[in-house]
Image (tube, grey):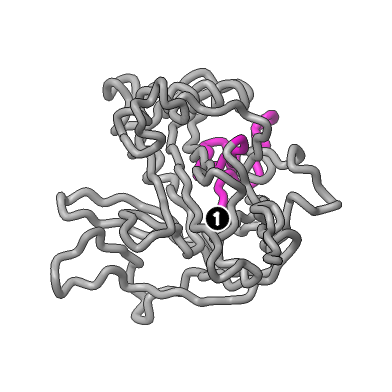
Amino acid sequence: MAITTSAEDRVPRGDVVAPLNFYAPPSDGSTPLQNIDPPPGVPERNFSYETLPITIHDIRTSSDRDPSSFTLDNDAFQILQGLPPSAEEDPAKNGGSNFTSDASISQLYYPEVTSLLLQNIPGSNKVIIFDHTIRRTTPSAPRGPVQRVHIDQTAFSAAQRVRRHASSPEEAERLLQGRYRIVNVWRPLNKGPVESFPLAFASSQTVNDKDIVPVEHRYNNGYTGQTAGVKHDEGQKWYFLSGMTGDERILLECFDSWAGKEEEGKKVKGGRVPHTAFEDPRQRADAEGRESIEVRALVFGP
């Protein structure tokens, strides 16, 4: 008689040692850069990656910290659980799209993300969502899981985003005088728990500024933005949440303008979270491919 296992039984659980790809600088000492959709003959980037075995702690099974103990101010990530289904998953509302139509996602899911951020980030009073990315682990997918340790924004690019997405130059300058952050809201789209290519993230307070390297992103239209590469350090502490399901979210804080402030009440430990997809060596060869969506938002206040 054939032996079957449930999706829950197939999910790798517990701490794991897995390879992560960290930033390695250009050999000639030049400014690190990434060319987006470069023309023939132009290299995609001028830097490389160093692959190292890293212990990644499973928050689901850890005995030292509860999932709710991680906060944006201390760790630059936060885990939310027990959330209701999205309207984007309801065929009566989404027209059959179910996270395949950008227009439907903007109409149905964006308002839910806005409410989620305002409810879970104390003092926040304004949210501007500026884009989203869907990732699927299939050869035909436009975007797959990113298996490189990175931070999505730098101080330079965060200010650029405020100026780019505010309603006017005057509003942008006013918003830049207060607290502003960039937060990604990440969730899986698989029907069952995530089996493959989970997301790993390092607590911001364990990551030194010296190990964060701005990387120019040069676009064909002349626009230049920045992300950050991350060098490895033994003091970094890495986590993941095994078998994530659709009622869970991870808030990933890419930038916080209060980070490094010394004034009372502005104690933010880093304010930027390195993260990466990784291949768990315990996952089945035929494990279901991970599908996910990340929505990127500017969050203002207090």
The residue sitting at 45% across, 74% down in the picture is 49
Q: Quadrant of residue 218?
A: bottom left
* SS under mark 1: loop
Horizontal and vertical percent position of residue 241: 67, 51
Q: Nearer the viewer, residue 194 or 42?
A: 194
Depicted 50 relative to depicted 69: above or below = below
Q: Main secondary structure of the magenta part?
A: loop
Magenta stretch contains residue 248: yes
**Side of 159 relative to 168 (left or right):** right
The residue sitting at 41% across, 75% down in the picture is 48
**For the view shown, which residue lies furthest in the bottom direction?**
27
Depicted 105 relative to depicted 119: above or below = below
**Side of 274 relative to 57 (left or right):** left
The residue sitting at 30% across, 63% down in the picture is 34
The residue sitting at 49% across, 40% down in the picture is 184
Horizontal and vertical percent position of residue 59: 73, 51
Quarter occupied by the N terminus: bottom right
Q: Nearer the viewer, residue 133 or 77?
A: 133
Q: Quadrant of residue 12?
A: bottom right
Horizontal and vertical percent position of residue 90: 46, 26
* Residue 20 visible at all: yes
Q: Nearer the viewer, residue 163 or 53?
A: 53
* Residue 175 visible at all: no
Q: Which residue is mark 1?
A: 274
Mark 1 crowdedness (10 Å alpha carbons): few <14, some 14-19, many ≥20: many
Depicted 24 relative to depicted 149: above or below = below
Magenta stretch in the rendered image: 247-275
Amino acid type assigned to the residue bearing label 1 in the image: Pro
